[in-house]
Image (cartoon, rainbow, N blue to C red):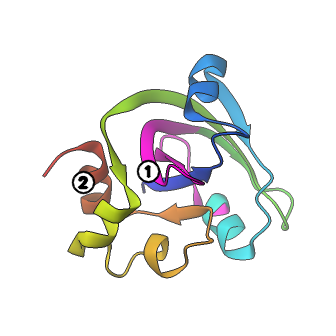
Amino acid sequence: MPYLLKTEPGTYSFADLQRDKQTIWDGVTNPAAVKNLREMKAGDQLIIYHTGDEKRAVGTASVISVDAGDPKKSLVKIESGKALASAKTLAEMKADTRFKDSPLIRQSRLSVVPLTDTQHKFLLGSK
């Protein structure tokens, strides 16, 4: 299943992930977001989304491993992918009917959001 991971670019940007090649995605405390992290599996595809002033999907990544041993948090190791050919803004997502029921729109503070395959393809630039 694909997921969208939100990050504040001033704290840890997609460029930081590309430089590091891999990182542990931690620091998530919202119970719904932690649940989404715990459901991830190695090989799941990710979209990295910059919050703050940018509010746009900027790149891809994939899940390497998930350590769900602690019920209050999950440590997900991810690997950098590529920058999106065309970053998609939150406004574009809100305007697209594929996102009308998405937690990305309905629960804007949620930092780990599951995506449908059609939402994922849209963010990748496919029709």
Is residue 87 toward the left or the right of residue 65 in the image?
Answer: left
- Residue 80 visible, this angle: yes
Q: Which residues are magenta?
A: 38-63
Q: Secondary structure at mark 1?
A: strand
- Residue sitting at x 47%, y 70%: 104
> Marks 2/1: CA distance?
13 Å
x then y, percent, for residue 68: 76, 56
Residue 55: in magenta span: yes
- The correct choice, above or below, for 13 with respect to 110 in the image is above
For label 1, the residue is 56
Q: Nearer the viewer, residue 25 or 70?
A: 25
Residue 60: in magenta span: yes
Eye-nearest disc, 2 or 1: 1
Q: Nearer the viewer, residue 105 or 36?
A: 105
* Badge 1 amino acid: Arg
Count neighbours of disc 2 (C-alpha within 10 A) and say few if under 14, some if 14 to 19, many if 20 or more: some
x then y, percent, for residue 118: 24, 61
For label 2, the residue is 122
x then y, percent, for residue 84: 34, 35
Q: Earlier in the sequence, mark 2 or mark 1?
A: 1
